Amino acid sequence: MDDSKYDQYLEHMRLSEYPMLKGTTYLDHAGTTLYSKSLIDRFSADMIANHYGNPHSASSSSQNTSARIDTVRTSLLDLFHADPDEFDLVFVANATAGIKLVADAFRESEGGFWYGYHKDAHTSLVGVRELAASHRCFESDEDVERWLNDDHRQLESSQNRTGLFGYPAQSNMNGRRLPLHWPGQISSKAQRSGNSLYTLLDAAALVSTAPLKLSNTENAPDFTVLSLYKMFGFPDLGCLIVRKSSGGILRQRKYFGGGTVDMVVCVKEQWHARKSETLHDGFEDGTLPIHSILAVQSALEVHRETLGSLERISRHTTALAKQLLDGLESLQHGNKTSVCTIYSGGSTAYGNASAQGPIVSFNVQNAQGSWIGHTEVEKLASIKDIQLRTGGLCNPGGIASSLDLAPWEMRQNFSAGQRCGTDHDIMNGKPTGMIRVSLGAMSTSSDVRRFLEFVEEYFVEDDVSNTILPTPPPTPCTSRSFQVESLMVYPIKSCAGYRIPTGTPWYIRKEGLVWDREWCLIHRGTGAALSQKRYPKMALLRPAIDFTKGVLRVRYTGSTAGLQVIEVPLSEDPSLFDNADYKNQTARVCGDTITTRLYRSEELNMFFTDALGVDCQLARFPASGTTTSTRHAKAHLQKYQKQQREPHIPGSFPEMELKQGAGPTMLLSNESPILMMSRSSLNRLNEQIKLNGGKAVHAEVFRANIIIAEPYVTPPGDEEPYAEDTWHGMQIGCQYFRMLGSCRRCQMVCVDQDTAVKNEEPFTTLSKTRRFDGKVFFGQHSCHVPLANDLSPQSQNPTITVGDVVRPITSEDEVMEDAGILC
Ligand SMILES: *Cc1c(COP(=O)(O)O)cnc(C)c1O
């Protein structure tokens, strides 16, 4: 088949071989776990037809296994053109385990060892430095070349230490392929200088889309690691390929495991003899992952039959990457500024397989040049069923140099809360991570096209092609009054809301509306509070508060076996809880560690466990005063809001500082005590969704506590959508509230609260119309401000009621004057 037809062939083959990819655009091949149907079929047929025993005995099933394992070992060596006389292959769990095995042996060198590594190294390769006596990070290829050609300088240490140089054959961050001639140069440098210097090549990223040839033994690395799942999707297994002549140093390793020794003496004397018949014998600790190794046979066969050679995969993916790069580079906003900043690591080598693999990493900027957070791109991609990876990508050196992050900045960001997998995507005006699109063996040009269309649709600001104009920031400020349309509480965090009956005055506390987010469901394994983002079915757990009976009644509407109901007493009866002294029951909610009380009742816990299909326990977080842990609001004014507010008047009341730990207290809500939204804003959003061909959404998806509306039927053009963005506060009935800032949104708003089904809207339209500084906002955080007059009943027991008039407060002084006291 010629190359031009290959793409079409893949497109067709994918339908039957990778049915799990149906409807998704899979662009995360660098960490791929994509296995084909034929592979699983062939492996399962093999397992069913043959009995493979544990290879530690002489039985026929044991011998059968041993023979097959040997075959797999040589087939893999063959795949990498490694002569079995010169190389051996050690099965390990993954590339990381191979790296660790090598490092464990080197650390036993007399006087320790010197470790040099390239800045493009994966985290797993960087970690070796902690075992070394001294180490050095090479900051560029030129840095390595200079060191290679400099015979006068010994290794970085004064002693004649053993040295190890580790580097990736391909960067997992940007796909850049590093020179493969270094190992040969390093070994000749070692010979010239009399040092013992070895090379550890991390080929984990390379071999998923390119061949690796170890046929030139002289120039081959001493140690090569890779992960087979990145090539075949299955099995989960790695290899360490060792050049036999360099294998001696591995025998320095101190630990021995079962299967690696011929004789061990324990009693009275301590002595052991390592297996020495083959090299791999000494390093495969314990029982081999037999079935995984056997599966490699099927994987090799099916891979070859369905995808062809690694050379063909390389040609195909190289061409696709060029198409992707060209596409992203050509995207421009209406004002001719670039949309994507691409981190190609200095390589302009797309199209040249020896210098560049099929990965493009980048960040997105708006027409004004501000960064769009990579988590925003990921949220939107996930709604569109585009799978990619964003963030730090397990490549600390590559990230730091591409994003120009100095060590102090990274430490500062860490102190400010940045962690792997958090929302802190832009800090101090700089991205902290990037978006990685990684093509793999079964990527096609239609994947590339779909991705380019996605970026174009959501991130290119071009008034002509966008049917929807971004909502201009509202002008300050309305004086018109609104009224409370509805009040909602969410007694169990992330479950459905309870609508407060019309005419019922509802108490407000400084932590928010009473009974709001007082309970949560805790994952029994991890201790973390469950959220709808991962468990959409939580929307079908519908709590209602029954004051007459004194219970929280929870219905589960998702069961096929009819309606299920359970009741939880509202009273805090200690006998209901797991232990009388609940102080040590900690749980995690949105990154905070809190003290909760876990319910004892198995009936209760099974109700929730059965409904959600995850082992969980109901917990209660009592209002402050009854517990040691307190949570504080994290909400703060967004930049776009600050710009809309009037300039600060000197001498006026200072803006309340809302540093973490200093803000208003709250129970289990994510960011602030009370979330409010406006019907007029929702109406505007729904008009835009419909313009876009989508279906209008209900207010429930935003999970607000207070929904306000304009009091009369206002013609659409006369409404004041998003006026609340500019308010400093609001008066509801005779109560005052301070606005704390806009609520940042994620794809959870796409869960239909009636059916628990995920949709594309409203997030896709929100991200076109309500994106400021790279983040998407809808609704406002707020907190109650107690009245100054401490004696009135309304101040001792403040309430609000559906139908109350809502009066916007449009200056900071007014919040203070009217309420007379700080909150
Ligand atoms: C994935 C990867 C690793 C780690 O592989 P594991 O299978 O997680 O051990 C190391 N280096 C590179 C370049 C990788 O892409």
Image (cartoon, rainbow, N blue to C red):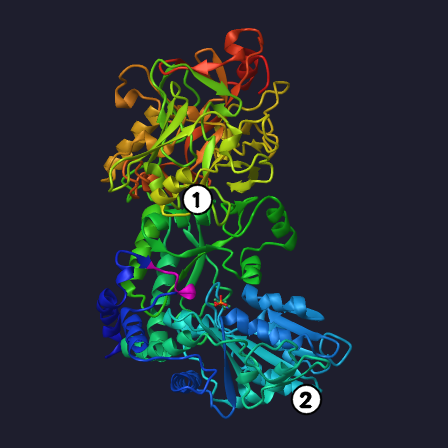
In the displayed image of the protein, which residue is found farthest to the bottom? 85
Residues at marks 1 and 2 touching, judged by CB atoms closer than 8 Å: no
Magenta segment boundaries in residue numbering: 26-32
Q: Indicate which label's residue lies in the foreground, 1 or 2.
A: 1
In the displayed image of the protein, which residue is found farthest to the top? 792
Mark 2 element type: helix
Q: Residue at x 30, y 53 (%)?
A: 453
Q: Which three-letter amino acid code belongs to the residue tagged 1?
A: Cys
Q: In which quarter of the image is residue 313?
A: bottom left
Separation of disc 1 and disc 2 at Cα?
64 Å
Q: From what the image shows, is residue 247 above or below residue 359?
A: below
Check the picture and name the quadrant holding the N terminus. Answer: bottom left
Q: In which quarter of the image is residue 161?
A: bottom right
On the question of residue 73 being in view, the answer is yes
On the question of residue 637 being in view, the answer is no
Label 2, on which residue? 192
Q: Give the camera-side residue of 705 and 677.
A: 705
Check the picture and name the quadrant holding the C terminus. Answer: top right
Return the x and y of residue 69 as percentages of the image width and height: 42, 83
Label 1, on which residue? 616
Q: Which three-letter amino acid code belongs to the residue tagged 2?
A: Arg
Whichever of labels 1 and 2 marks the residue nearer the N terminus, that label is: 2
Disc sitting over residue 644 in the figure: none
Task: Count residues near mark 2 (Cα–Cα under 10 Å), then give few for <14, some for 14-19, many for 20+.
Answer: few
In-image side of 614 versus 416 (left or right)? left
In-image side of 229 versus 159 (left or right)? left
Return the x and y of residue 210 as percentages of the image width and height: 40, 76
Return the x and y of residue 599 as percentages of the image width and height: 48, 36
